[in-house]
Structure formats: C-alpha cells, structure tokens
Image: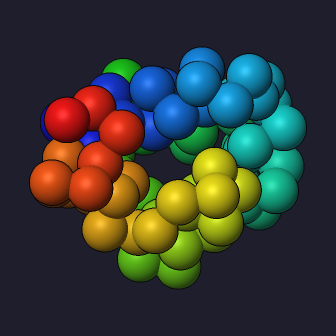
Amino acid sequence: MFSNKIAYWADKKGMKHKYIAKVCGVSSVTFSSWVHNKTQPDLKEAAILARIFGITVDELINWGKNSERD
C-alpha cells in the first residue's frame, strides 16, 4: 500500500508527520489520511514526498528491485 510506504519512509528518516505535512503544503489531517489509506497524495504531492525522503517517486510508489525493502 502506498500509505504504508509513506509511514515507512517517514519513520526511516525520523521525520515528524506534522513537518512532512507542512512541507507538502497540506494539513496534518490530510497527511494522516494518506498514512491511513483514506486518500492518496496526487502526483505533485508524491514528488514532494519523494524529495523530502531523498528517494524517487518510483521508490515511493513501488517496491522494485532497487527499493529499500528488497
């Protein structure tokens, strides 16, 4: 699930959800809805998340061969 990847990377990078939400330009409630798989970030927000985490959008969306969890 995309949401589990957001939570995984936030935890791995030691980032607070409030901080990530602020950088993405969304409310804490919106960010929480991503983490709990109620909604998904759009492409622009996914690109911001990837940049924050220091990964590619592909790594955020897929657990491919080059992903952290392989």
Q: Is residue 63 above or below residue 5?
A: below
Residue 50 to residue 69: above or below: below
39 displayed left or right of 18: left
Return the residue nearer the eye: 12 or 2: 12
Q: Residue at x 15, y 55 (%)?
A: 64
Quadrant hosting residue 20: top right
Q: Is residue 17 above or below residue 54?
A: above
Relative depth, front residue between 37 and 68: 68
To which quarter of the image does residue 61 belong? bottom left
Specify the quadrant that holds the N terminus.
Answer: top left
In the rendered image, residue 16, in percent from the top left (x then y), is placed at 78, 24
Answer with left or right where residue 22 lies relative to residue 36: right
Number of numbered tags placed on the structure image = 0
Tell me, yes or no, if residue 37 can be seen here.
Answer: no
Q: Is residue 18 above or below residue 30?
A: above
Q: How is the image coloured?
A: rainbow
Residue 48 point in image, percent of width and height: 63, 68
Residue 27 spot, x, y in % from top left = 72, 44
Q: Is residue 22 visible?
A: yes
User: At which x and y percent is residue 50?
Assistant: 55, 62
Q: Which residue is nearer to you in this view: 53 or 40?
A: 53
Which residue sits at x=41%, y=69%?
A: 57
